[in-house]
Amino acid sequence: MDDPVVLSSGHVFDKSTVLSANGKLKIDKCPITRAKLEPKVYPLAVLKSKITSKKIARLNQLIFIANSFKNDETKFNIATE
């Protein structure tokens, strides 16, 4: 999930899943409740921020691991087996 939005049903989905390129709902019923949806979605900025922070932290961990293998061929070979 990259850009969470909440539907009028109260359920959260990724924006790209429920909205077309022109910003209109791709669906008319909630996939969870099957309730008819209002044509609006609401962004969840706090959740988006948390998702982004987690992705950055994971990327930083991967960079750290890659750097630790950079000068140690034996360690690299063991990790890739």
Image: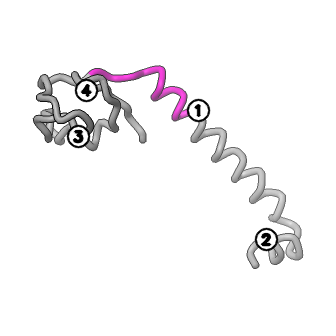
Q: Nearer the viewer, mark 1 or mark 3?
A: 3
Secondary element under disc 3, as helix, strand or loop, is: loop
The residue identified by callout 4 is 7
Q: Give the Cα distance between marks 1 and 4.
A: 24 Å
Q: Which residue corresponds to the image point at 69% horizontal and 44% vertical from the top-left?
A: 60
Residue at 33% over, 36% down: 13
- What is the x, y in percent for residue 24? 13, 33
Label whose residue precedes the other's in the sequence (2 or 3): 3
Q: Are marks 2 and 4 in contact (CB under 8 Å)?
A: no
Classify residue 60 as left or right of residue 13: right
Q: Is residue 77 above or below residue 40?
A: below
Residue at the image position 53 percent from the left and 34 percent from the top: 52
Front label number (2 vs 3): 3
Residue 65 screen position, x and y as percent: 77, 56
**Eyeballing the image, is 74 above or below 37?**
below
For label 1, the crowd category at 10 Å Cα-Cα, with few meaning under 14, some 14 to 19 and many 20 or more, is few
Span shown in magenta: 42-52
- State the image coordinates of residue 80 (x, y, percent, origin top left): 74, 74
Residue type, numbered disc 3 = Pro
Q: Earlier in the sequence, mark 1 or mark 4?
A: 4
Q: Residue beneath label 3, please? A: 31
Q: Which residue is mark 2?
A: 79
